[in-house]
Amino acid sequence: MTQKRYDAVIVGSGPNGLAAAITLARDGRSVLVLEGKETPGGGVRSLPLTLPGYRHDVCAAVFPLGMASPFFRGLPFQDYGLHWVHPGVPLAHPLDDGTAVLLERSVVHTARTLGRDGQAYQALMLPWMAHWQALVSELLSSLRPPRRLDLLARFGLRGVLPASLLIRTHFRGERARALMAGLSAHAMLPLEQPGTAAFGILLGLLGHAVGWPVAQGGSQRIITAMLACLEEMGGEILTGRMVTALADLPPARAVLFDLTPHQLVRIQDVDFPGTYRRSLQNYRYGVGVFKMDFALDAPVPWKAAACSRAGTLHLGGTWEEIAQAEQAVWQGHLPRRPFVLLAQPSLFDPQRAPQGRHTLWAYCHTPAGSVADMSDLIEEQIERFAPGFRSRILARHTFNAREMEGYNPNYVGGDINAGVQDLGQHFARPALRWDPYSTPDPRVYLCSSSTPPGGGVHGMCGYHAARSALRRLETDGRGR
C-alpha cells in the first residue's frame, strides 16, 4: 500500500464513513477511505438480487432522515446525479376491514381520515411543522448542550413516553393507534419501553415535512453521489481493503472507523485502556431482521386501493398485534404474525424493473442472530392485505439475521441500528464520554451508527466524528 501520508483515513464506506470523509475533505484535509468489500456503500447498496433487470435495495430503501438531515441537505446531490422520488403518499397502514390509514404530506388531510382522533393527531403534529428543521437539528446533534432547549423539552414531554402509553392515552380509535404503533416500531424495541414514542412522533413529522422518498434508480445512487462529491474535493477511496490492524493503514494523523464497538476492539494495536475497552465489549446490540426481495409480474393487489399510492407500508394490523409481535422478538421468540415493513419503489421509479414488472422490499424483526426462515410468515402478512399476492411472484431472495451480518459486519446479529437505541444507550453510545466519537487513543475515532445520534441514513454520526477529529487536528497544527 502507498506510503503517502494523510490527514485522515476512514475505515468503512457506509453513509457515515463517507460523511466523515466529505466533512474532512471540505475542510481542505487529505482523506483516504478504505472499504473491505469490492463495492462501497455499507448499508446503502443496490443489487440484482432476483432476476436480470430487477434492481433491489439490499438494506436501506426509504430516506425520511436523509431528506431531513442537516448534513445531506448541505450537499448539492442533484449536481452528482442523485434525484429523490416522492410517492404520492409517504406511508400506508392497511387494516383488516379493507381500508388503510394514510400518512399524507398534509397533517390536516391525514387527520381527516382518523375520525374522532383527527383533532388529537393535529395537536400532536401541527405544533412542530413550523420548527421541524430546528427540532431535527437538535435530535440529530452530538449530545452537545442544546441550542433550542425549549424545543427539546417540549418534544421530550411526549417523546420520552413508551409508545404504548402515548397510544392508549392520546388516541381512542383503532386507526390512529395502528398508525402510531407502526411508526414507533421502527425503534426495534418493545413499545412498552420509554422513549419509543419519540420514534413514532419524529417519523410521522418527517412524513409531513419532507416525505419518505426513495432514490431514483436505487439506493446505491446516494453512495455514488457522495463518492463523486468526495473525489471532486480530492478525497480518495480504495475498495477490497479489509483492515484488521492499524498497521494495515498508511500514515495518518487521524483514523476514523465506521465500525461498531465489538469490531473496533478487535482491531490490533489500538491503545485502549481497560475501562474503555470493557465499555466497548459491553455495548449492547438489538434484535435482528429477516429481509426479503421480490420480483413481481404485476403490482401488489392491495384490498385497499389507496395502498398503491404509498411508497412504504406497515403490515401489522392493530396496535395490539404490533406491540405483541415486537415484544415477542425482544424476548427471543418468533412472532406468529410479524410486523412487516414494506416498500414498493418500482410503482414510482420505473428504473427498478423491466417495463410492466415490479420489485418489492420487505423485512420483519427477529431475535438477534436468528437463522429462522420467515418467508412464509412475511408472505402471509402481505396476502392478508393483498389476496393473490403470491401468484404475482416471479422470484424471491432472502437474508436471515445471521446472513445480514455476513453481508455487512456492522449488522451484528442482524441489528441494522448498530446497537440498541434505548434511553440508556442513547446517552452512552458507545461509552459514557463527553465526546463520544473520540477514544483514549488520540488518533482513533468512531464514526458509525454506534455513536450519536444513532441508526438511520443521515450521515450525522460521520459528520460529528469528523468535526471532533478536526478540533484535534487544528489544535495539533497550532502546537507545531
Image: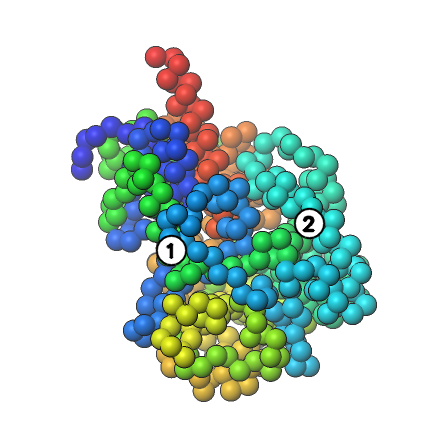
User: Residue at left 46%, top 29%?
Assistant: 468
Of residues 22 and 7, which is closer to you in this image? 22
Query: Please, is residue 141 above or below residue 158 in the view?
Result: above
Q: Amino acid type of disc 1? A: Arg
**How far from the left and from the top, in percent, is residue 353?**
38, 72
Snapshot quadrant of residue 392 = bottom left
Is 195 situated left or right of 480 in this image?
right
The dot on residue 221 is: 1
Disc 1 crowd rating (10 Å Cα; few below 14, some 14-19, many 20+) is many
User: Residue at left 38%, top 67%?
Assistant: 351
Q: Amino acid type of disc 2? A: Met
- Alpha carbon distance from label 1 to label 2: 29 Å
**How far from the left and from the top, in percent, is residue 227?**
34, 46
Query: Please, what secondary structure does the residue beneath circle 2 have?
Result: helix
Disc 2 designates what residue? 129
Circles 1, 2 touching at the beta carbon (< 8 Å): no
User: Residue at left 79%, top 65%?
Assistant: 117
